[in-house]
Image: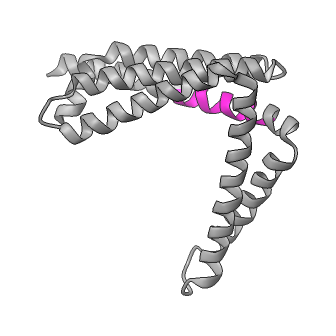
Amino acid sequence: MPPALRALAEHWGLVLTYGLITLGLGIALLVWPHASVTVFAVLLAIQLIVVGIVRIVQAVSIDRREGAARALIGLLGGIALIVGLLILRDPLQSVVVVTMILGAFWVIAGVIDLLQAFMGVEREGRGWDILTGVLSILFGGFLIVDTEISLKVLVVLVGIWLVVVGVIATVAAFRLRNARTDT
């Protein structure tokens, strides 16, 4: 087992906690999809703060010889913690800004996919680049133009995503626990 994974296996309980909190937040978003977007923002901020703390603890527990991994994981934890706290500062405004930025990102990514499809050499997969480019532009434009509806859709999509990530993290925690006892 790689040293970083071994260190994580020693703290499998943190991974389990992260997985269960993430799963719970995802289920809450899916059960109450018409809940206030402010509640969504606060739940997202809490999840980011928990991720930040878990990553910082993970960075501290990694073997000192893996300095680059420690630095990157710690940096990611710090950024997640800061973003979570910033969202808590003004939840509704944060969600609107994030939605518009995500929309702009998707539009730009879609344009790049289309340019890549039409300007690149003839190859397989060009149709997928065109399809993803067009869909990305449409979805990104939708997020920018109709923020109110897109926020509700975004809440449901994030809820689904959190459920998936929560289940994966919970399963990974039990696998890490088993890996710890096997060694």
Total tally of numbered discs in the picture? 0
Residue sitting at the far bottom: 122
Helix, strand or loop: magenta stretch: helix
* Looking at the image, residue 156 lies above or below residue 170: below
Taking depth in this image into account, of 167 and 33 the one nearest to the observer is 33
Name which quarter of the figure residue 118 lies in: bottom right
Foreground residue, 120 or 12?
120
For residue 83, side relative to residue 115 (left or right): left
Residue depicted at x 68% and y 68%: 111
Percent position (x, y) of residue 161?
61, 33
Image quarter (top left, top right, bottom left or bottom right) of the N terminus: top left
Q: Is residue 124 depicted above or below 6 in this figure?
A: below
**Residue drawn at (27%, 19%) of the image:** 178
Q: Quadrant of residue 83?
A: top right
In the displayed structure image, the side of residue 120 where residue 32 appears, left or right: right
Q: Is residue 70 above or below residue 183?
A: below
Residue under the image location 28 percent in, 27 percent down: 59
Across and down, in percent, residue 87 comes to 63, 25
- The reply, left or right, for residue 119 in relation to residue 33 is left
Span of residues in magenta? 153-165
| Location of the C terminus (image quadrant) | top left
Percent position of residue 31, x then y? 75, 17
Residue drawn where x is 18% and y is 20% of the image: 182
Residue 94 position by quadrant: top right
155 falls in the magenta region:
yes
Whether residue 87 sits left or right of residue 36 in the image: it is left
Q: Is residue 31 magenta?
A: no
* Color encoding of the figure: one colour
